[in-house]
Amino acid sequence: MAKIPVKPEEIFEEIISDYKSIFGENLRSIVLYGSAARGEYVKKKSDINLLIVLTENGLNLLGEALSIVKKWRKRAVSVPLFLTSEYINSSLDSFPIEFFNIRHSYKVIFGEDILKDISINDKELRLQLERELKGKLLHLRESFFESADNKLRLKILFSTSLGAFLSMFPVIIHLKGIEVAEKRRILLDRTVEVLELDKELFTKLWDIKEGKYKFSKGEGKKIWEGYIDQVRKIAFEIDKMPI
């Protein structure tokens, strides 16, 4: 049975060896990002996220890495992002939020620090933030009608949607000119304070996500109504930000 690591550091040496055996000199960098890089990895609850930077020739060898990817999936390592530095630099305007979040919390475990000198434009962050936020608002509305009669589905809806909004909160805080916290709970509290959101509601949503709060079907509807109202408030705040 595959052993799930207690700490991400336990697997670094082996995973570097595995990918070096496939890509050799075409392997430029392996970067840890996400919860494990923030120090928030929890065994059997968190995935370990990796960005693997290859040369253009290295991309031709991806098929040979299939067995390695499958091996590590059994040990809580997500399918890595296999990119080239050229792709990263040419995609900063298309995916500014994604690269902002990776650069915000990352650790180079092998090779070059590809992310150190990338430049992400605040205007492009602001534009993607508005698109993403309003899209998530529409999804939250639609998904409620599919989940309203099922507490488990509502719990999943609240948990996954809060996770999605948490990926946008570092950008909001950054665009407000405030230092971005690494720990997600601190980030949530800071965003709630800065945007003057409903602290009690977001604390409840966090506890639902963490499995620490159970709600009745009737309460679930009230939570959703308050949630929608708060997301609309966030969208209004984003609209007021200059492009």
Image: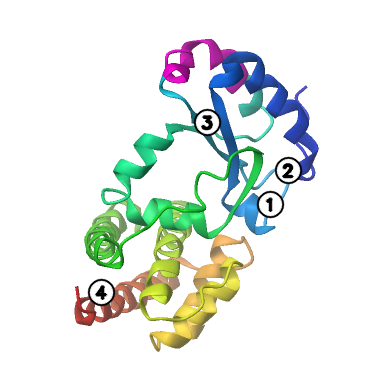
Q: Which is nearer the N-term, disc 3 or disc 1?
A: 1
Q: Which mark is residue 81?
A: none
Please say whether residue 118 is visible from this viewpoint. yes
Above or below residue 179? Residue 98 is above
Q: How far across and down, in percent of the image, does residue 212 sit?
A: 64, 66
Dot 4 corresponds to which residue?
235
Say which residue appears at 30% left-offset and 62% top-offset. 121
Judge whether residue 59 is colored magenta. yes
Classify mark 4: residues with Cα within 10 Å, few (<14), some (14-19) or many (20+). Answer: some
Q: Residues within 10 Å of mark 3 (few under 14, many from 20)?
A: some
The residue carrying pointer 1 sits among few (fewer than 14), some (14 to 19) or many (20 or more) residues within 10 Å by Cα, namely some
Say which residue label 3 marks: 79
What secondary structure is marked by label 4?
helix
Sequence-first disc among 4 and 2: 2
**Which three-letter amino acid code belongs to the residue tagged 2?**
Pro
Asked whether residue 207 appears in the rendered view, the answer is no
- Relative to 112, does residue 166 appear above or below in the rendering? below
Closer mark to the observer between disc 4 and disc 2 = 2
Say whether disc 3 or disc 2 marks the residue closer to the N-terminus.
2
Asked if marks 2 and 1 touch (Cβ < 8 Å), the reply is yes
Report the span colored magenta: 57-69
> Which residue does the numbered mark 1 point to in the structure image?
41
Q: Is residue 27 left or right of residue 153?
A: right
Which residue in the structure is indicated by mark 2? 8
Secondary structure category for the residue under label 3: loop
